[in-house]
Amino acid sequence: MINRSSLPSLLKLIKDFPSVALLGPRQVGKTTLAKAIIKTSKRDSVYLDLEDHDDFNALANPKLFFTQNRNKLIVIDEVQRKPELFPALRSEIDAHRKPSRFLLLGSASVDLLKQSSESLAGRIIYKELSPLSFNEVKDKYSMERHWLRGGFPEAVAARNAELWRLWQQSFVRTYIERDLPMLGLSASPHDVNRLLHMLAYNNGQVLNKSEYAKTLSLSVPTISMMIDYLSNAFLVRLLQPFSTNAKKRIIKTPRLYLRDSGMLHFLLNVKDANSLLKNPKAGFSWEGYVIEQVIEKTGDDRDYYYYRTQDGTEADLVICSHHTPEIIVEAKMSSSPSISKSLFNSMEDLKVKKGFIVIPGSGISFPLSKNVQVNSLDVFLEKKI
């Protein structure tokens, strides 16, 4: 099993809070991580999977079950399948409040788990689990393999490209036909599938709901609803634009990225590394991949934006602390990039003193100027930023 970098911080949260929710897409490794926590924890534990009929029925009387297991860490998997649990969880925590009571695993964001955020306010802490990052797999898999296949454990570990594509096909179909409707999405699976392919084709572009609606013969509100559900299911990222300068005419619409590069490549019908490099969307794929790896590594204590003005100045990723821009990251496929006018102007506009151009490869690091460095992704991810 690949060690997850989030395990130590998750163990600390469980030690400090009565209830912790581990949220992330299906098949991302939440159950495996929870079982590692059970094994590591010094407390007795009980594990329930709400997709299992018997486990689901074990919570027919949640108050009784919680009372009987008060001295155990109760792990509830796929908690979104039983939203009526949340008021009972609140009552139990209030009656017997101490750390390490509950670990809840869910495949939906806090926005979709509204009952949890309302019922458990002040009683729960949320932690997101993303697909395996390159930092987590670099001792086992190459960056090229991870970029092509993405970070879902079964996808990156598949014995060959055919099995990887079969896994992706099953994953996408299950989400479209079962998981998203179960979370409340009322759109037809056919329309969701068409939208996903369109989003893949436009990966990394400024979101244009009107154009998508026109192309798919759907209403803008329907497109908005579907994108909201895809975002809340952790499948797409809406990267917001950075804007504080009223004198600049700033693009104010988010960019949309499919978060897992393997899912993106499946939807683009990319079959192997060679076809990826020849694909006209490879540059946008690399950009999205770099953004996900940087955000996963840097964590929740920073804010992330892109920057673009109407005169064409833009930056792929602006890393901020307390809404103050500190670092600009540009993702480029070139092995010998230069400082573009756009990067120079972005750093000047935002008063940023550190810029990085992140490229494929391994062990690459050289300066282009006093304030701009070229790094391969592996080198950049080792930096303390």
Image (spheres, grey):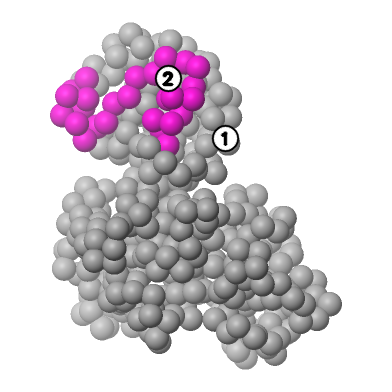
**Image check: 358 left or right of 187?**
right
**Within-10-Å neighbours for mark 1: few <14, some 14–19, many 20+:** few
Return the residue at label 1: 8
Q: Which mark is residue 73?
A: 2
Q: Considering only order in the chain, which callout, 1 or 2, is on the residue closer to the N terminus?
A: 1
Residue 239 vs residue 152, the one in the foreground: 152
One can see residue 112 in this view:
no
Which residue does the image show at 29% across and 11% down from the upper left?
64
- Residue 27 screen position, x and y as percent: 32, 48
Q: Nearer the viewer, residue 167 or 299?
A: 167
Q: Residue at x 57, y 80 (%)?
A: 332
**SS class, disc 2:** strand
Determine whether 61 is above or below 228 in the image: above
Q: Is residue 339 visible?
A: yes
Q: Residue at x 66, y 64 (%)?
A: 379
Magenta stretch containing residue 53, yes or no? yes
Residue range of the region highlighted in magenta in the rendering = 33-58
Q: Secondary structure at mark 1?
A: helix
Q: Rate crowding at label 2 as few (under 14), some (14 to 19) or many (20 or more) other CA atoms within 10 Å.
A: many
Amino acid on which the number 2 mark rests in the picture: Leu
Q: Is residue 44 above or below residue 292?
A: above
Q: Quadrant of residue 285?
A: bottom left
In space, the residues marked 2 and 1 are separated at their CA atoms by: 17 Å
Mark 1: amino acid: Pro
As displayed, is residue 218 above or below residue 230?
below
Q: Quadrant of residue 279?
A: bottom left
Where residue 268 appears, x then y in whole percent? Answer: 31, 76
